[in-house]
Image (cartoon, rainbow, N blue to C red):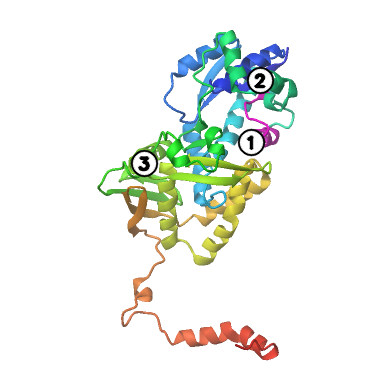
Amino acid sequence: MSSCVLAYSGGLDTSVILSWLQDEGYKVHAVYVDLGQPCENREAILKKARDAGAVSARIVDAREELCRDFAFPVLQWQAKYESIYLLGTSIARPLITKVCLQVAREVGADVYAHGATGKGNDQCRFQLAAEALDPTVKVVVPWRIARFRETFPGRSEMIAYCQSRNIPVKASVAKPYSSDENCLHISYEAGKLEDLGVNGVELVDFGMTLSPQQAPDQVERVTIAFDKGIPTHVNGKALSAAEIVAELNRIGGRNGIGRVDMVENRFVGMKSRGVYEAPGMTLLYDAHRLVEQITMDRDLMHLRDRLAPEVAEMVYYGYWYTAKMDALLAFIREAQRTVTGEIALKLYKGNVTVDGRSSRFSLYDEGIATMEGGGSYNQSDAEGFLRIQGLPVRVQSRVTPRGY
């Protein structure tokens, strides 16, 4: 009998898949990767897996690694998929796969299974990560197997299956959307959100953020400090990576920060609608950019900005463990060498404004930038500069007059 490691959440899909894999002849090891999902009874999740027949079940706490080694390098890139999405789910999938394959090696399993569907992005992220980390591993995806889909064409059949086997699940047929949560964000999709005429922000029962209308009627000030592009302090207190994200989730959440409703282009080719909330990461992206504005060389910043959409695509598609990504991560570490400083933000009913900037590496020189008299900038120098810059267009104009 072949051994299989299952990326297990304890929800409806993976509960069904755990039992189905056993029917297929696998000994199943269930791995719950703790990335800051909702406060659940972790021991109850493990017990449910064992009661359902898993030969082993374990929880691996990867919250710190997720923030430190995955989310923060993406933050340094200012990478947003299609200029909006902060990649909270995308970032997590390569780490889940890494943890599961580590367990597979430990227990001697040669199969890796997950609950992603054949229509979504997660199947790409899981599989590409698995093949990069262990080219010999067999990836089993029940949703891509016809006999599984024939047995479970919808949620009602899965719920009935769990009831017949006394597998406790919270899911209901009437649930209007599905959600996925970690400490970086919560995503909401499917169900009634597939109707673009529905107001997603009004439909979703957000778990991290108050609505801007319900947020306090007073401004809250927060300071965030960075060292080499990595956040280190919140309100003057040194915190670990996961602690920083958690604290800013609380601060941003109570001020209605970080909600997004978008239609995005999936890797598999279709457009899909997603609603997201990411209060802490939204504050970090805003603060990080403000530090860069005073500490980062213009041409280096512009080069990074041209490459950032490509990095976002690679993360979104699942190309984390690649030579190209290794090189890009090495580049951003060097590019962020001087991105050190502290930013003060004011938060009010979903809005974020800057309240102050400081850095020992600041390139801002008031004596040069001032619009007042004096200063150290000689405006006469601009004449020669522009004569040189204008040389090509003057030559072109003589050869091919444009008229006006």
Say what amino acid the circle numbered 2 marks: Phe
Residue holding disc 3 = 211
Q: Which residue is drawn at 41% across and 62% down?
A: 294
Query: Which residue is most to the bottom?
Result: 398
Which image quadrant for residue 318?
Answer: top right
- Single out the mark in the foreground, 2 or 1: 2
Where residue 361 sits in the image (x, y, percent)?
40, 61
Mark earlier in primary sequence (3, 1): 1
Amino acid type at image mark 1: Gly
x%, y% of residue 151?
69, 18
Q: Is 16 in front, or is 394? A: 16
Q: What residue is shown at x 31% (from left), y 49% (from top)?
A: 348
Marks 1 and 2: in contact by CB < 8 Å? no
Question: Magenta segment range?
Answer: 112-133
Question: Can residue 30 be seen?
Answer: no
**Is 125 in the magenta?**
yes
Q: Under tag 3, what secondary structure?
A: loop
At label 1, counting other C-alpha atoms closer than 10 Å, the crowd grade (few under 14, some 14-19, many 20 or more) is: some
| Between discs 3 and 2, the one toward the N terminus | 2
* C-alpha distance separating marks 3 and 1: 29 Å
